[in-house]
Amino acid sequence: MSFIVQVTDIALPSDAAQRQKLVSRIIEEFHASDGEPSAKFAQLYQQLVAQYPCLSSYKDGTDECVWGDAPLINNFGQRIAILDIVQNEEQVLASVLKLAGDLGLKVIETQSDTVYFPNTPETQSFIVSHEKPVLKEEPLTERSVLHFIVERLMPILEPAGFTWKNREKWAIRTADYGTQCVWLGVEKKRDMFVLYITARFDIPSVCEVAKLITGDSSETGWIGCNYLFFTGQHTPPKVSRLEDLVQTTEIIEVLVKEKILPFFETTLSMITLNSSVNNSEKCKFYLSNFLVQAMSLAYLAQPARIQETADIYRGYVKFRNYPEENIMRINQLVNRLIDLNPTL
């Protein structure tokens, strides 16, 4: 449901009917004009989108935007601005009142036909009661950053069956093949904190096969899908201040809800996990760090197609013009897997 707020610099009659008639005329003039917003309204626009970005600036996750249409600048004219607020209505209205009041502008909340004049006790009372709380800025540490993120992911992950192991790093649940985990990491680099999030699959049977084909007793059976896997962004998020951490954590929450959890739900069996890992689109994420585990997974899930899976990796190596030694490594792994099952 839309929540319409009008901001204006015109003198408003005290009579409601006269006021509505005057505002309607100003709105008609605004819609009939192609002019740019006045300096005062342009300033209000810039200040508002600094707090609440325009809908057009969202590539994904548009449900987060508080504005109902875009581009928002089109709603600002010479004498009036018309704002369609679709969520966090009272909090956003408090911001509008505060910024508009500093510019000497009046605000009309159309649902109740309430007029807020600049800096009146009634207006100030509404702002104080509903404005976004100011967060106390304290020096961040690796532990405090990690704890902040964990606290906000708990309500998302725990209803999905995840429990926290070591509380600060692992959210884990069981699957047919082993466990699914969300791993969090924070690393301080100079004045920044780098945030890491990985969807991890721990598969004991893959571990056993990996040890057999490499002869290395220290081989593991886990496969990880990192921030790049889910977002396409090569650089993990970084924060330096509490405000950055709040905004970045909101992005991580959306990532977990819309990307990581659905990915976990579609990889509950070894066959579906194998299909999600060993394909031409995703193989690039495993070639360097998880090739042994990926090939071991393919061997366990669909042994008769082990050569077909190997061809996916061979094809990517050739496409990227990587050194021939990568092909030799793949062939060596396939041969050792075939040695485990000569019927392949």
Image (tube, rainbow, N blue to C red):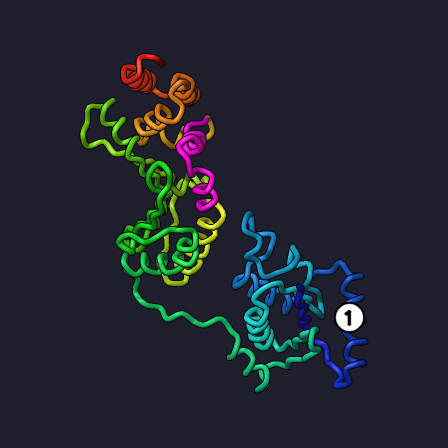
Which residue is depicted at the point 46% across and 42% down?
265
Residue 200: quarter of image: top left
User: In this view of the protein, which residue sits in the foreground, 310 or 242?
Assistant: 310
Q: Give the range drawn in magenta.
A: 260-279
Circle 1 residue: 26
Residue found at x 60% / y 74%? 100
Q: Is residue 327 magenta?
A: no
Establish if 259 lies above or below 240: above
Crowding around mark 1 (Cα neighbors within 10 Å: few <14, some 14 to 19, many 20+) is: some
Q: Is residue 274 magenta?
A: yes
- Is label 1 in a helix, a strand or a loop? helix
- The overriding secondary structure of the stretch rendered in magenta is helix
Residue 318 can be seen, yes or no: no
Q: Which residue lies furthest to the top in this view?
A: 343
* Residue 179 rendering spot, x and y as whole percentages: 34, 42
Is 323 or 295 nearer to us in this picture?
A: 295
Q: Is residue 200 shown left or right of residue 127?
A: left
- The quadrant holding residue 40 is bottom right
- Please tell me which residue is depicted at 44% across the width and 33% down the height of the picture: 272
| Residue 308 in view of the camera | yes
Identify the residue at image location x=63%, y=65%: 85
